[in-house]
């Protein structure tokens, strides 16, 4: 959306007609709307919101009489005209709130109903009227912008106090608004599809379990052994012992083979200093017991018999 021109008449603090050219202001890229308190800065934003949605942001929303300037002449009607481009279309919106005007005949005043007009600029530069219905204009603008008035005020205008309320809003409300702004419907569709696949997989698992249980019942009936456990029930002999008995069993159980108590484990060897010669291995001590001679092997007709064969022959 891009604003081009805004014309305000007898609206808010403006008693006369004020014309704002946004194209000239945004020629440098950015512009600042500033002024002293009561100069009408918020009223300009209210006029933009009123032209788009027929209402002003926040608590300033009220009857049409509150939108009319107290400084306006009785014969000057309250009117807001907004020229903008949205969705690739150049549109002009004119709105007049419900207000009092002097009677054309006689004295006194009469109440004039609210009026709205929507026009579109054609390729040849002329303006073509589209609608004079409040509902049709509201639906057309809401469809082009993709936001309601509350969402537009919370995200685009950010009036005083409303942005903090948006930050403190519930996750569901913020999620709906941000999802609509950033078009996260495709991610929601993927999430729904994954949830559907999960439910289908769970149903397949349950169906398979039921089929296996039915087959187990048939096998149990065919076996005819009353000692076999019922299908679907746990075997008491195969169940683990109670958790309370596990520590006592661990305390009574002997240590496994090769297990050494950390208290009796020898300390690790000390590291050798740099430059020191390597430690010599301990000398092997000779056993005091004489070595038993190995029995000799003699092939038939070769060599002399050994002492073992001679002892056996004796």
Image (spheres, grey):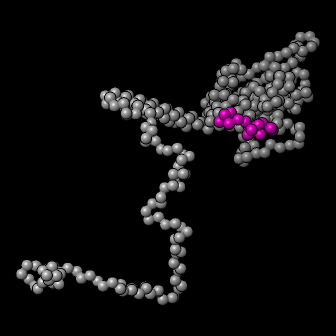
Against 125, residue 310 (above or below) is: below
Which residue shows up at 75% across the image and 43% down it? 25
Q: Is residue 212 left or right of residue 247?
A: left
Which residue is at the far right?
A: 107
Q: Quadrant of residue 90?
A: top right
The picture places residue 248, in percent across and down from the top left corner, at 54, 51
Which residue shows up at 48% across the image and 44% down it? 240
Which residue shows up at 51% across the image and 55% down it? 252
Residue 211 in view in this figure: no
Based on the picture, tell me whether residue 6 belongs to the magenta stretch: no
Q: Which residues are magenta?
A: 157-175
Dominant SS type (magenta): helix
Q: Quadrant of residue 144?
A: top right
Q: How many marks?
A: 0
Which residue shows up at 47% across the image and 64% down it? 259
The picture places residue 225, in percent across and down from the top left corner, at 34, 31
Residue 161 in view in this figure: yes
Q: Where's the N terminus, which quadrant? A: top right
The picture places residue 54, in percent across and down from the top left corner, at 75, 25
Q: Is residue 121 left or right of residue 292?
A: right
Against 225, residue 256 (above or below) is: below
Which residue is at the far left?
A: 301
Which residue is at the far front?
A: 314
Of 81 and 306, which appears nearest the observer? 306
The picture places residue 251, in percent across and down from the top left corner, at 53, 55
Against 216, residue 237 (above or below) is: below
Q: Where's the C terminus, which quadrant? A: bottom left
Q: Is residue 272 left or right of residue 143?
A: left
Of 310 and 172, which appears nearest the observer? 310
Of 167 and 82, which appears nearest the observer? 167
Based on the picture, tell me whether residue 168 belongs to the magenta stretch: yes
């Amino acid at each position: 959306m891009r604003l081009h021109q805004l014309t305000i008449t007898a609206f808010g603090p403006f008693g006369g007609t004020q014309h704002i050219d946004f194209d000239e202001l945004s020629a440098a890229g950015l512009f600042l709307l500033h002024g002293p308190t009561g100069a009408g800065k918020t009223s300009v934003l209210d006029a933009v919101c009123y032209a788009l949605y027929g209402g002003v942001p926040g608590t300033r929303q009220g009857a049409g009489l509150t939108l009319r300037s107290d400084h306006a002449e009785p014969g000057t009607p309250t009117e807001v005209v907004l020229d903008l481009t949205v969705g690739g279309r150049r549109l002009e919106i004119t709105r007049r709130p419900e207000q009092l005007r002097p009677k054309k005949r006689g004295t006194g005043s009469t109440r004039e109903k609210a009026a709205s007009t929507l026009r579109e600029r054609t390729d040849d530069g002329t303006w073509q009227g589209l609608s004079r219905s409040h509902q049709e204009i509201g639906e057309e603008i809401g469809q082009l912008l993709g936001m309601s008035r509350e969402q537009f005020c919370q995200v685009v205008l950010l009036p005083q106090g409303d942005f903090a309320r948006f930050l403190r809003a519930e996750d569901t409300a913020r999620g709906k608004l941000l999802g609509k702004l950033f078009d996260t419907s495709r991610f929601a569709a993927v999430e729904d599809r994954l949830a559907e696949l999960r439910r289908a997989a769970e149903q397949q698992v349950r169906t398979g379990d039921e089929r296996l249980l039915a087959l187990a019942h048939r096998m149990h009936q065919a076996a005819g052994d009353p000692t076999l456990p019922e299908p679907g029930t746990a075997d008491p002999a195969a169940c683990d012992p109670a958790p309370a008995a596990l520590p006592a069993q661990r305390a009574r159980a002997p240590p496994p083979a090769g297990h050494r108590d950390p208290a009796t484990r020898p300390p690790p060897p000390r590291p050798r200093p740099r430059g020191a010669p390597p430690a010599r291995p301990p000398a092997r001590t000779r056993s005091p017991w004489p070595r038993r001679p190995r029995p000799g092997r003699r092939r038939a007709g070769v060599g002399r018999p050994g002492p073992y064969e001679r002892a056996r022959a004796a």
